[in-house]
Image: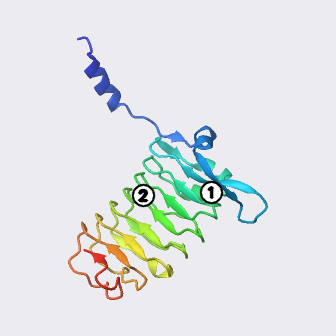
């Protein structure tokens, strides 16, 4: 039979679209925030924001070592290793991607990390000494460990995950902790957590 416009639109929506590579053409118009380089010898663009462009491969980031604020949310990214070498990052938003493994390089200046709405199953052994805000809500996380090595972590969002225990979450530095939508039987392990009821359970 003859395909109607509706039928063709439905078929098009079922088509699998391969993620695209983060290209220089995509990056150039999205770079902004001219600032002096850390070593003081020149100027560089320090902000990159590209949302919802079906990006999978972000290897091209290696060419832009001066980026400090990175927002690649709502894409198809699975691999964090290309962040290696971006030593000046202060804020990273990779929410709503397809990240299943937290193979994150040591980013000594990173303060804000948003990995909400991904496919993470565990958080272990991160090395981010200046991290203040960690957003991990809406993943599949069943285990968290190693956060004790983050001495200034004050906000931790873990709602809508698969946690069954609060072990490793009783951090004295936390001012805000969200745990609603998990599979917790009790709050044992939160003894050193947010003061004054700062945990959202």
Examine the rendering and report whether any part of residue 23 can be seen: no
Image coords of residue 101 (percent x, y):
45, 60
Image coordinates for residue 41, horizontal then vertical, percent = 79, 61
Q: Nearer the viewer, mark 1 or mark 2?
A: 1
Residue 28 percent across, percent down from the top left:
63, 42
Disc on res. 100: 2
Q: Residues within 10 Å of mark 2 (few under 14, many from 20)?
A: some
Q: Residue furthest bottom?
A: 191
Res. 115 image quadrant: bottom left
Does residue 147 lie above or below 89 as drawn? below
Residue 152 visible, this orientation: yes
x and y percentages locating residue 79 in the rendered image: 51, 54
What kind of element bears circle 1?
loop
Outermost residue, top side: 2
Residue at image position (39%, 59%) is 116
**Residue with the mark numbered 1:** 67
Q: Earlier in the sequence, mark 1 or mark 2?
A: 1
**Along the line of sight, the residue nearer the viewer: 165 or 160:** 160
């Amino acid at each position: 039979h003859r395909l109607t416009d509706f039928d063709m639109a439905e078929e098009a929506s079922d088509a699998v679209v391969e993620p695209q590579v983060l290209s220089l053409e995509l990056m150039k118009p999205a770079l902004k925030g001219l600032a002096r380089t850390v070593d003081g010898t020149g100027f560089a663009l320090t902000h990159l924001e590209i949302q919802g462009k079906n990006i999978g491969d972000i290897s091209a980031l290696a060419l832009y070592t001066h980026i400090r604020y990175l927002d690649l949310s709502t894409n198809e990214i699975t691999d964090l290793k290309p962040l290696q070498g971006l030593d000046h990052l202060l804020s990273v938003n990779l929410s709503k991607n397809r990240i299943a493994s937290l193979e994150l390089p040591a980013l000594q200046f990173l303060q804000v990390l948003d990995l909400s709405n991904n496919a993470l199953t565990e958080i272990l052994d991160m090395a981010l000494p200046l991290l203040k805000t960690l957003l991990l809500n809406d993943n599949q996380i069943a285990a968290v460990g190693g956060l004790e090595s983050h001495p200034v972590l004050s906000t931790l969002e873990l709602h809508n995950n698969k946690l069954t225990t609060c072990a490793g979450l009783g951090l004295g530095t936390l001012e805000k902790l969200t745990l609603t939508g998990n599979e917790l039987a009790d709050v044992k392990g939160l003894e050193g957590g947010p003061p004054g009821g700062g945990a959202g359970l």
